Amino acid sequence: MAGAAVLAILAGWWLVDGLPPADAPETVVATSAATGPGGAVGAVPAAQPSGDAGPAPDAMLNPSLILVFESALAEAQATGKAAFMAMAPALLAKRLPAELVARAMGLLERYVDMQEAMQALPPPDAGDPASLRKTIEARAEVRRRYFAPEEIEGLFGDEIRQDTLMADKMALARDANLTPEEREAAAQRREEALLTPEQREQRRAFTAQVDVQRQTDAMNARGASAQERFAERSTAYGYEAARQLAALDQENQDWNNRLDQYANASPDQQAQLRDSLFNERERLRLAGALALRGSRPTPSGPNPSPSGAGQTPGRSPS
């Protein structure tokens, strides 16, 4: 596996208990805007379909704006739409230039409404490409209710093409008339037709992230030592990736230890520990981190890894 793709996964590694600690190395955080949520949101150009020669896309209609919205939702921890929208101008002002906030507010309100409508859709049947295609079309219909075509392309075009590719590959995998080589070649053609080179590279990086997460889960389950972790990762991904993953293991463990100390303290002690254990950025994420931690079992092993690494934080308030 290419070392560059493996190093790209480190951007999502900071989602410890669903929320990142404060001081991720700049070289790691800087990649997160391109590879997924979990760090700083940068100016990622909105991708166009291969061969599209239309006018330049609206810079505001960009997948990065969805990361901004999800980051605001995660920070707000609001219990309803009205409460969230009251907080939204200040949250967006922290993430966007002042001249973009008013327009972003209009898009954000429609995004929240769309996400709530999406939650009412039934999930696709596992492993059924026809069911997945029906779900994709149902989601497309919901998007059309809230957004204009150019908004859908700019904000969600990448997501739509990724979903379409998934359904295509699932159908190819179930086609008994194709040999394994023919399936692989057809899948490659669909990927090249639907995705830009940058998106294909991001897809490879995401695959690397999934592989690393599975390997880490297996090491956690058997209580692998730091030396065993380093040896296995070095063999699979190279020395530099193994070294950075080991450093992030230590940061994750430190973050979890501080969460434990805070959660187990009395209310009077928590007031003092909040300032002594966490910096300003971490304090913004503290309540959400504890809520997420309490909602799922703690992973086993000496260096529990985030079960939500690489996922978009937050959800639409309901």
Image: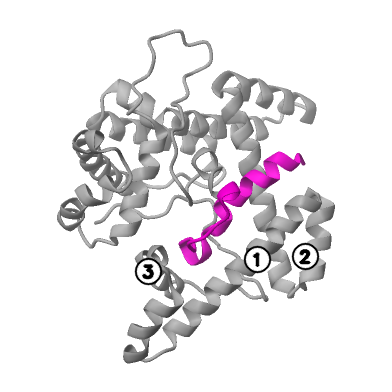
Magenta segment range?
1-28
Which residue matches tag 1? Answer: 249
- Where residue 311 appears, x then y in whole percent? 49, 51
**For this rendering, which residue is in front, 269 or 72?**
269
Q: Give the residue at x 70% y 72%.
A: 221
Residues marked 3 and 2 touching at CB (< 8 Å): no
Where disc 3 sits, the SS reads: helix
Position in image of residue 208 (x %, y %): 68, 45
**Percent position (x, y) of residue 89?**
20, 47
* Element at label 1: helix
Q: Which mark is residue 229?
A: 2
- Say if 73 sits above or below 248 in the image: above
Q: How far is disc 1 from disc 3 in space, using C-alphas?
A: 21 Å
Q: CA distance from mark 3 to mark 2?
A: 31 Å
- Measured Cα–Cα span from mark 1 to mark 2: 10 Å
Mark yes or no: residue 177 visible: no
In the image, is 190 to the left or to the right of 56?
right
Mark closer to the observer (1, 3): 3
Q: Which mark identifies residue 283?
A: 3
